[in-house]
Amino acid sequence: MSQNNVLKTIAEKVPSMSKSQKKIASYILENPHSAAFLTVGKLAKITGVSEATVVRFANFIGYAGYNELQQYMYDSVEKQLNTVERLQMSRSVYSEQEQGIYEILEDDITNIRATMENINIEEFQKAADYILNAKKIYIVANRSAVSLGVFLQYYLDIIFGNSELVSSSESAFERIYQLNENDVVIGISFTRYTKSTIDIVSHANKKQAKIIAITDSLLSPITQYANVSLQATSKMPSFLDSFVAPLSLINSLIAFIGKQRPDEINQRLENLEDLWDQYDVFYHKKN
């Protein structure tokens, strides 16, 4: 089902809905922007129905579950909202009192759960194999996603010593000039997808490098160039995206890779620890 006709489909099916389903439909049709960011629990609470009813509603509309329905709603409205509009929306969704803090934390937990439920283990293992066998690893990330790129590059470089972070700059393409089929490019891109990241990954695809996409949806434009796509949910009704689940996914990937070649990696880490001790890198409490 196309993302463009989600609201139209809901509206057409209202006459045949139950009373509870009509409550959900009315809220979504009246608040399409905010509804796309709501978890199943939050939508159930707002509309006064059970979470099971929300899930059945998604099935009734024609989706496998609420996560799929939400993704199509999200993709259809997210690009229409700038950061100012999203900030204004967050004020209507989250309480300004102490409870609002817990609501944000709960949404982060929900994002991690959704990521766990939808993770493709075969794709995950394939991504790990690409990284383990790469001659050189390039991590492409821009704007807020740079935070994820820095974290991933830091640990991959500790483990292998062959990774580089590539961000938007005039020299980005020069830095991947010698890219070939023995290299791996990890593109990190979340809505609102940064064009420069897509451009660099597209170029890497033409150079026949292995492409790993870390993104929020199979509908993400970066996936069309990827050999492997790993999805992590980042939805939050605010001017910022939640990178808790993407970071957790990256943590899992790093930890998984670290277990694959224990002798080789242990030796490298032991050498690094000796070097850090030699130059007193870390703080030691004085007795």
Image: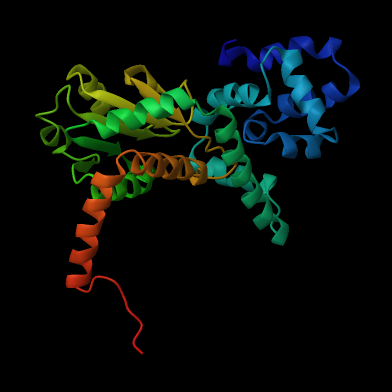
Residue 224 position in % (x across, y down): 36, 17
> In which quarter of the view is residue 58 placed?
top right
x, y (%) of residue 257? 35, 39
**Residue at left offset 42%, top offset 29%:** 124
Answer whether residue 196 is visible to the viewer in this image: no
Q: Does residue 188 appear in the picture of this structure? A: yes
Q: Nearer the viewer, residue 154 or 38?
A: 154
At a point 72% along the width and 27% down the height, the residue shown is 28
List the single residue furthest toward the bottom.
287
Q: Nearer the viewer, residue 266 or 44?
A: 266
Residue 90 to residue 101: above or below? above
What color scheme is it? rainbow
On the image, the x and y values in percent for residue 21 come to 83, 22
Please state which of residues 96 and 49 is positioned toward the viewer in this rendering: 49
Q: Looking at the figure, which quarter contains the C terminus?
A: bottom left
Task: Identify whether 147 is placed above or below 206.
Answer: below
Rendering coords of residue 172 (x, y %): 17, 36
- Horizontal side of residue 284 vs 208, given as left or right: right
Left-right relation of 170 to 152 = left
Residue at the extreme right = 19
Please tell me whether residue 147 is drawn above or below residue 213 in the rendered image: below
In percent of the image, x 14 and y 24: which residue is there? 180
> Quick one: quadrant of the N terminus?
top right
Name which quarter of the figure residue 48 lies in.
Answer: top right
